[in-house]
Amino acid sequence: MTDTALDIRASAGSQARAEALTGPNGPKPRPIISPRNIMIYGTLFVVSVYYLLPLYVMIMTSVKGMPEIRMGNIFSPPLEITFQPWVKAWAEACTGLNCEGLSRGFWNSVRITIPSVIVSIAIASVNGYALANWRFKGANIFFTILIFGAFVPYQVMLYPIVILLREAGLYGSLTGLVIVHTIFGMPILTLLFRNYFSSLPEELFKAARVDGAGFWGIYFKIMLPMSLPIFVVAMILQITGIWNDFLFGVVYTRPENYPMTVQLNNIVNSVQGVKEYNVNMAATVLTGLVPLIVYFVSGKLFVRGIAAGAVKG
Amino acid sequence: MTDHAITSVKVNDVSLNFGSVEVLKQLNIDVHQGEFLVLLGPSGCGKSTLLNCIAGLLDVSSGQIFINNKNVTWDEPKDRGIGMVFQSYALYPQMSVEGNLSFGLKNARLPKEEIQKRVARAAEILQIEPLLARKPMALSGGQRQRVAIGRALVRDVDVFLFDEPLSNLDAKLRSDLRVEIKRLHQRLKNTMIYVTHDQIEAMTLADRIAIMKEGIIQQLDTPHAIYNKPVNLFVAGFIGSPSMNFLEGELTNGAVDVGGTSVSVGRYGFEPGNENWSGRAVLGVRPEHVIVLNGVDTQPFSFDATIEIVEPMGADTIAWTTLGGHSFTFRADSELNLEEGQKIRLGFDPARASLFDAVSGERI
Amino acid sequence: MDRAGRPNQLFRNLNAKIASIPMVLTAVVIFTGATLWTVVYSFTNSRLLPRLEFVGFDQYERLWSSSRWIVSIQNIMIYGTLSLTFSLVIGFVLAAFLDQKVRFENTFRTIFLYPFALSFIVTGLVWQWILNPEFGIQSVVRSWGWENFVFDPLYNQSLVLYGLLIAGLWQGTGLVMCLMLAGLRGIDEEIWKASRVDGIPVWKTYLFIIIPMMRPVFITTLVLIASGIVRLYDLVVAQTSGGPGIASEVPAKYVYDSLFLRQNLAQGFAGSTMMLLTVLIVLIPWAYLEFGGKKRD
Amino acid sequence: MKKFAVAATFAAALMGTTAIHATELEVTHWWTSGGEAAAVAEFARAFEEAGYTWIDGAIAGGGGTARPVMISRITGGDPMGATQFNHGRQAEELVEAGLMLDLTEVAEAEGWRDFIHPTSLLDSCTLDGRIYCVPVNIHSWQWLWLSHKAFEDAGVPVPTNWDEFAAAAPALEAAGKIPLAMGNQPWQSSGAFGVLAIAIAGSEAWEAVNIDKNADVAGGEEYARVFEAAAAAREFRKNSNVQDWNQATNMVITGQAGGQIMGDWAQGEFQVAGQVAGEDYSCLPGLGVNEIISTGGDAFYFPKLNDPEKEAAQLALASLMVSPEVQVAFNLKKGSLPIRGDVDLEAANDCMKKGLEILAGGNILPDGNQTLSPDTQGQIEDLMTEFWSSDSISAEDAQRRYAAIIAQAD
């Protein structure tokens, strides 16, 4: 009896030991094909198709000839690749009597975008900084009005601004257009900069004040060097917005300054005559190229900046 | 402490409101030349706010602030002759250590040689010379705080303001730096105003401590006085660890009746005029003033107790018992090997205790 | 003591005030001034040029008796609700997926975000094309053998808003996803650890813990999406021109058409005043909560 | 800081404007398609041959896109040298505000009133006896374009008027054709209605409604028939899922659709497709019911520039635009009819000649642009868009709303 009892105890012990040897050991296995991964990657993949489809269609169409477009479906790859539509969109497409394609508008867009982006960001960043760190009486009232401004449809503002610019003698000038872009970029940019600057440690600002730096000293020497991400966000938003702007570009400037989007509109919207879809698509891609490149190049900073500018309210 | 004649920083009737919230209520403090003043209190008591007001980082709602006999109430921080050290160090991340140290001096448009000289001196004092070229990112917490102190140092000012400078450091670094700050004060002999919620820092560093609660200074005195003669229940309970034992009872004819036990307070040093006070009172006894009696009642008051909980601290032991229905702690030598459930006789001297009015909380 | 050199209240933070002049001017002169101007002229009978001949509420009466305006308002309500819901939900779900330490995160993120670089005009054109039954998705599916497959949202009055939505979401959700992702990255890791230890299911953690913590992100996102919805114009013009019929008309288009096509400034101003009024009704409670209720510091 | 300064200088340099030479004239218009641009080029060529410089300011997307720009620039104090408008009432207020150059002297010296035909074109350029614009062409809306192929396929003869067309519609449908092709844009809906109105209600009723704004007539018997016809046409067009008018024309060309109601500009599409009038397609002016055409068209206005040199150039351009050679060259390219009765268009094809005959015969009406304000037209467009695109509005409802709009019209 005692023997068996001992035996049982021994065998129970060895069983436990055996389990210790064969049971879970080391890193928990994580199968690559798990339901969780299938769901995540599956969804991401399907959604990616939705997002990429238009780009695919644009590019495929832009390298097809017109006969092929009329025959085939828009998703099929081109049987014969031609870059003629691109050449035409860039250099030959006519707007009225000017047959320079998009090339003329391209440089105008550059001339409009660069000063507008610089001025609007400069002003909005200083605004945001003043709001975040130098709260003076009434500042929040103005800021609230500014946020309301973000909801005012542009169309409503067109006419009053024409009058204001006329009175200021700036109507039709590039300066006037820069001012308009600065005004309409201000609400969102100021919001972003204000949020970003309030997310920076306040003690830093206090330390700089004790160190004798003034309003501009703190802005240029302390805040600016720490604000690369949010400046990247602002730049991306503004470059995209201003480059893609059609309404202000056409209403507030003279024809010699018309941006690329006006040419795009002219190429795409010529109501009469045969629609050259391939040229339209090439022109569309060409017009979108600058903001697209900006996105692809600085996408990572964009997310970082967004994190800094939007997360803290 | 020797030179009481010269006032370095004077806070005169300062109040501060945020909307309808009164954060500071008519504060008055005179800080002497070369004095180390600690502002101590629980969070939200207004101590950091007061420091920011002195620095000029916040505008006061009413009252005045004088630094070196000059009314600086409306002066910019840079013009007040102060240096400041922050809890989060607030080092400019994009500048090197040297850049951080010299930024304020450059703003003041000091000559280059002078800047170099001062930076070198500060670096020498704080032993951060090897770090001068580094960016703050590449420094440890302790090094960062040293640089932050250096930044105040180079300004060559009379008044240093510290806003919880050690709170972000771990325990060991904190005690190391605490000593260094003390040494620094001995060497420089500047006026220092130091905000903390840590009573050990306050006790070890301060010439005088101002204990604040809800925007009011409760007591402003030397660490010794604050520890031994707290002016009210709040101060008594805030200072000391473990906290003072509070025994509530009726005070009549020189004795407090605590849950049936009468404690004679005949030798207690009443505040002038309170000698014949009677009514509900609180008797405060510091755990370290309680003595374990070994058969002989050497203390004016003694009682039998049963130990309920024992907390060995290494050097000594904190033990919990009950007196007159109140929880009662005392500090004992760890050599006594106290055990839970053990019967023991304890005693203390009511003359070293504190008596408070149970209603107003004021010292009697 | 010395009371001399007392700084004037006006000159406190003088530099900050000077620096804010552009903002103040924009807020007061442009946004407030132009808005008031618009409201005043909405009570006139201005046609091509503004003139101050007041006609009371005539413009508003006409506005609300116009079936196109009513349809526009209904459309923007439906589109707005759907667009807001879907961009928040899709944006958040995509962000949550990307936040699972997936491979190729950068690639996916770029794919989702790139449409935002393209203008609404481009977006509208491309989707108009893809949704065109003659050579878009419908014809492709038919060529695969489903002869009766019908997918022509842009030519169906009851579906056209969804056609707009497909394009609008394509353009805008990337940014929402980005904002959400940023918000998720800002959440303390320990929250996740705590919920894992407590055995709270992942979806519950998101719904009851993470989302409430991301309130500021949601507010910024809401401002961005909502302002885009109110201004919705280019996409409609490029994709459907308001059609078929008036099934996809929107208020901004009504305003624009009145101002510049119909040469009836006052009617357009009346329309825009109504739009602004709606915005104010929505925004004032929010602004009160945001700035009035709590005090910074 | 340094970088900032550099960027600022760069920006300043970019903002510099180019120098402007004298006697340049900037002309804005929305003619951007191939044929249109070629037609504008005729103006430009003639103008430059006369020693001036033509700066072309084309804005595509039609009047809706271009007009805000033009109005903004004129009222914004930065006017162009000349600008296209549909003549009629669009620019009325600009003229009233004194922003437009008075052309009366040139017009009288050259005797415009003598050769411009119909004179209603000049009338709509006239305000208080002064002339402010130059009509350059005549477009008419009242055409029904028919595909011979479609009717052959359906086994019915090609109709010669609207009633026959309506009768043939079921056969077309049975053959899998769309009887009536129509684009979805608002102007097409309201244009087609206008055509039906003239054809079915007759010119008198049309004039009563459109010129005298007689709401009783608009709500009366004749117009009730118009709305019934339109409701029928609405059924015919049901499956034409196209946006642009030329896509609809293309359906007629390829025989997918039986016909299309469209203006004379559709002609160009048939020509480009190599179709021959009378063989491959037919055109029925006035829907074959009432051979009347309206004479709308385009006109140029000349904003005041307060610069004598520029003014001279403006007057020179105005005079060039109505000169016989330029008229012929321009209208041949544009596919429209010339505004002068005294020029000969030999190159014109059958359909165009039909138009010229009607024009010469005087069976003409002014265009809606000339008689109704853009605001009223816009309201009618809204109504028509709604009406044509959905069965939910009955003919009676639509007529009631139409009469209400006419009653309010000014």
Image (tube, coloured by chain):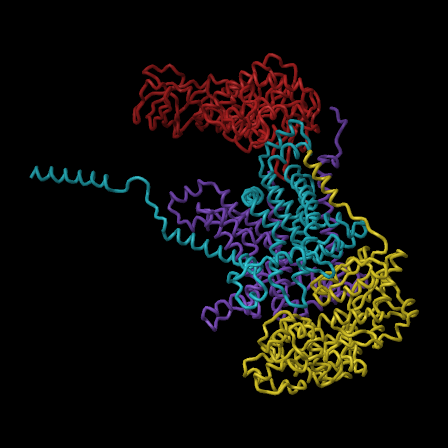
Chain colours: A cyan, B red, C purple, D yellow
**Residue most extreme to the top:** B2
Residue D236 in the image, given as x and y percentages of width and height: 60, 80
- Left/right placement of residue A180 relative to residue C290 reads right
Q: Is residue B266 above or below residue C41?
A: above
As rendered, which of D10 and B89 lies closer to the eye?
D10
- Left/right placement of residue D14 relative to residue C135 reads right
Residue C290 in the image, given as x and y percentages of width and height: 60, 47
Q: Is residue C297 above or below residue A104?
A: above
**Quadrant in which the N terminus of chain A appears:** top left
**Quadrant in which the C terminus of chain A appears:** top right
Q: Is residue A133 above or below residue B91?
A: below
As rendered, which of C108 and B306 lies closer to the eye?
C108
Residue D81 in the image, given as x and y percentages of width and height: 82, 59
For residue C46, say whether it is visible.
Answer: no
For residue D104, say whether it is visible.
Answer: yes
Name the image quarter holding residue B241.
top left
Q: Is residue B3 above or below residue B338?
A: above
Name the image quarter holding residue B336.
top left
As rendered, which of B2 and A119 lies closer to the eye?
A119
As rendered, which of B168 and D383 lies closer to the eye?
D383
- Residue at image position (87%, 75%) is D115
Residue D134 in the image, given as x and y percentages of width and height: 83, 68
Q: How many marks?
A: 0
